[in-house]
Image: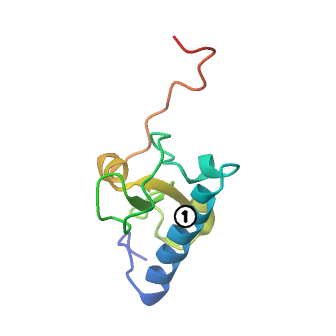
Amino acid sequence: MSGQRVSTRAWSAFRLEFFEEGKLLDADPETRHQANCWLCGMRINYAVPANSTPDSHNLDHYYPVRDYPELQHDPANARHSHAECNTERGADAPLPGLGILSRNW
């Protein structure tokens, strides 16, 4: 199997289902953090269609499809991200964050 993304009805349905899951998580203050962009940690705009603006939702793969095509449809490999953050990351490994701050400076 090549490292090319496969675009099928199943893939479209998976993306839509993942987007709707993110909207539900974002609507609840208890789970909102789970719907934030996994790359930058900021809130995603779920009020607009996915991939329509830089801060709209985009399904990102933790393990890039280029290297792991068998994980394209694996829900455990899917992450909520901003369209812009995912584009900037490309198929590279995510940059490590600073972690949790001990206090606000």
The residue shown at (36%, 47%) is 85
The residue shown at (51%, 46%) is 38
**Image quarter hosting the N terminus:** bottom left
Residue position for label 1:
23
Q: How is the image coloured?
A: rainbow
Residue 68, percent from left and from top: 48, 63
Instruction: Residue at the far right: name it.
Output: 30
What amino acid is at disc 1? Lys
Task: Determine whether, in the image, residue 82 is placed left or right of residue 78.
Answer: left
The residue shown at (52%, 48%) is 36
Residue 25, percent from left and from top: 62, 59
In the figure, 15 relative to 30: above or below?
below
Instruction: Residue at the far bottom: name it.
Output: 9
Instruction: Residue at the far top: name it.
Output: 105
Q: Give 96 or 3, whichever is nearer the viewer.
A: 96
- Could you say which quadrant of the image residue 28 lies in? bottom right
In the figure, 17 relative to 98: above or below?
below
Total label count? 1
In what element is the residue under mark 1?
Answer: helix
Residue 61, percent from left and from top: 48, 59
